[in-house]
Amino acid sequence: MEYFNLDSGAISQEVVVQNRQGLHLRPAAKIVKAVANMNCQVKIRKDNKVANAKSIMSVTTLIATKGTVLTIEANGPDAAVAVAKLVKLFDDKFEEN
Amino acid sequence: MTGNESHMRIFQGKIGSPGIAVGLAYLVDRGKIRIPMRMVMPEMVLLEKKRFGDAIGLSQQQLTSAMGRDLSEDHRQILEAHIAWIEDQYMIEEVERLIENDHINAEWAAKKLFDGLKATLASESKGTRDERSQLFDEVCQRIMRNLMGIQQDTLDAVPENVILVAHALSPGDMAHFDRSRIIGMATDIGGPTNHASILARGMELPGVVGLEHIASEVKSGDLIIIDGLEGKVIVKPTLRIVDQYQQRLALFEEKETRLLEIKDAPALTRSGELIKIQANLEFIEEIRVMRKHGVKDIGLFRSEFIFLLKGGIATEEEQYEVYSKLLQEMEPDCAVTIRTLDLGSDKLTEDMNAPDETNPAMGLRAIRFCLEREDIFKDQLRALLRASVYGKLRIMFPMISSLGELRKAKHILDEVRQELEFEGIDYADNIDVGIMIEVPSAVVIADVLAEEVDFFSIGTNDLIQYTLAVDRSNEHVSHIFKSTHSAILRLIKQTVDAASAAGIDVSMCGEMAGDVQMTMLLIGLGVRSFSTNPAQALHVKQLVRMIDASDAVEYAQKAIRMNVCGHMARFIKEEMTERFPEIFKDFAWTI
């Protein structure tokens, strides 16, 4: 995975996985769906592992269980919107029900 | 004839979903594709990539067309996850990279990628069974099949009117189901509480599970019969058997159609009493069936199935999810009566530290277990109270045998209320609290108990078992288990009388409540509310609408004086056949 500079226009924010299942099948699909068409790169970092938020394969294999602290990083014109969208998904616990 | 006969085989399994189906088998041959693995020449790499791209495109088409159907939320989410995988550029690039760098064909490359992903998952999720690895398999298999030009049998494109036969059907498979094309299902593994069975019941799809090796014994195109009433499958039946089943099926369907005509009619007796008919539910998926049969209230939700499905103690959150969803699904003012955990030590899983009991029916179960394990009980009550804001919840304690027990249970409920208040968590303040009447001692002190609860619900199965001291599953004594014992009817009458004297609600939720052989007798004894399996509700309603209440009282008075079960049974049969021949002529009596 390539890294990108957190220069101007890049945003990062920490989130905690709060939903019971963790970044499971459906939450992962929701993440990808939320940012798929955004004009920016979006990454989710767990310790030294980085997942591309536009790839379900990448997000699913990040293995983030409930309580895990993650950092969302976005770079590009839509970065702010993308981060806000993802933060909301995490905060809403992916509307698991 | 003899030629046919020698081929007929009967497989005994478990009832997954009741009903009958006669039709051709469609074998869902999962996990048995042999994946061709070969090296490719450098000049063929481009072609392999193109093959892979085409398979992805085809997969996309299949999934998108499956999305167009009317799907449940759960199914839709599973499909969306499949689509997200198929459209994942990184997955595609990774496979292309493997084709190019390792000089292998597309099938091999895809297999390599997915095997690697599964290994990552397995090492990091510490061996716990995972929905994700199942999804990997399904996505990978779809790609393989499309690569190899094998027709998808992911149920998107099955022929019409077939019976699915499979080793196992996953929730993912079920998501692809086009219910209108499939008339039945049979699987090697699974029991009544596995996901496929539950979904099948929700779709009213006749199914038999736990058949062990049906998938290897049946070929697509074989004529088979699903007997979801007796839990068996007949492969290559003789013409005579087919005839029999087709008649049974036609009769079954004709009755159903006729019954559905009164789905929205009120359950009014001929003499004008309104009888309440509610449903007994075990799974949220059954709400659809309940609605189809015109039932609006849940008279008994067996909460232990959340635990049984999980195979362990369900957390507060897990329970809250189910309860709140249940309540949200109801129409306004329609009640959901949830019975607290009614697990016996016989059903406890390892992680509940089951004590060894020689007589579990009389042991540490239901409310006794809950009072012993206050932690589990409180989690459940918290989940119930939190969910109560979404509708009309009624809480019911099972197996109450003394006033002390009831008070203890209510005391714990009060404690939980206070805890929630302290935490600032909302709950409804009008929750009715009631008890199951299923232990004879509770009937004897019904007048006392009635003073401290909002409702009674008579559980006839246990009431009979405890009153007559008969274990119904013990074949040596099961013939003594009789609803026509006058002691049982007297106990029911006593309970109903105590409830009406105290002005509280009384309902019946045991098997007897759905047994039309007993309906008129029960109405004669004063029962005005029944909670039955969704499929039985209309049968009861149909009969209720023919009954005259004063006639029922007279009839019940006569019946209850028959002190020999056999006499009472004969009396019931004669009277019912005479009064309602359209229902009871050629009836399969079980009393």
Image: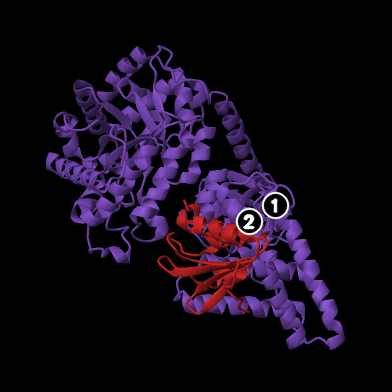
Chain colours: A red, B purple
Does the CB distance between marks 2 and 1 fall below 8 Å? Answer: yes
Quarter of the image for residue B430 reads top left
| Chain identifier of the residue bearing label 1 in the image | B
Residue type at mark 1 is: Ala
The numbered mark at residue B66 is 1
Q: Quick check: B399 left or right of B165?
A: left
> Is B393 situated left or right of A25 in this image?
left
- Residue drawn at x 55%, y 79% is B119
Residue B79 image label: 2
Q: Residue visible at 66% across and 70% down? A: B140
Crowdedness of circle 2 by 10 Å Cα count: few (<14), some, many (20+)? many
Give amino acid for label 2: Leu
- Identify the secondary structure beneath mark 1: helix
Q: Position of residue B191 (x, y in %)?
A: 47, 57
For disc 1, the neighbor class at 10 Å (few under 14, some 14 to 19, many from 20) is many
Question: Viewer-proximal residue, B382 or B193?
Answer: B382
- Expressed as whole percent of the image width and height from the top left, the position of residue B471 reads 28, 49
For the residues marked 2 and 1, what is the alpha-carbon distance in whole angstroms?
A: 8 Å
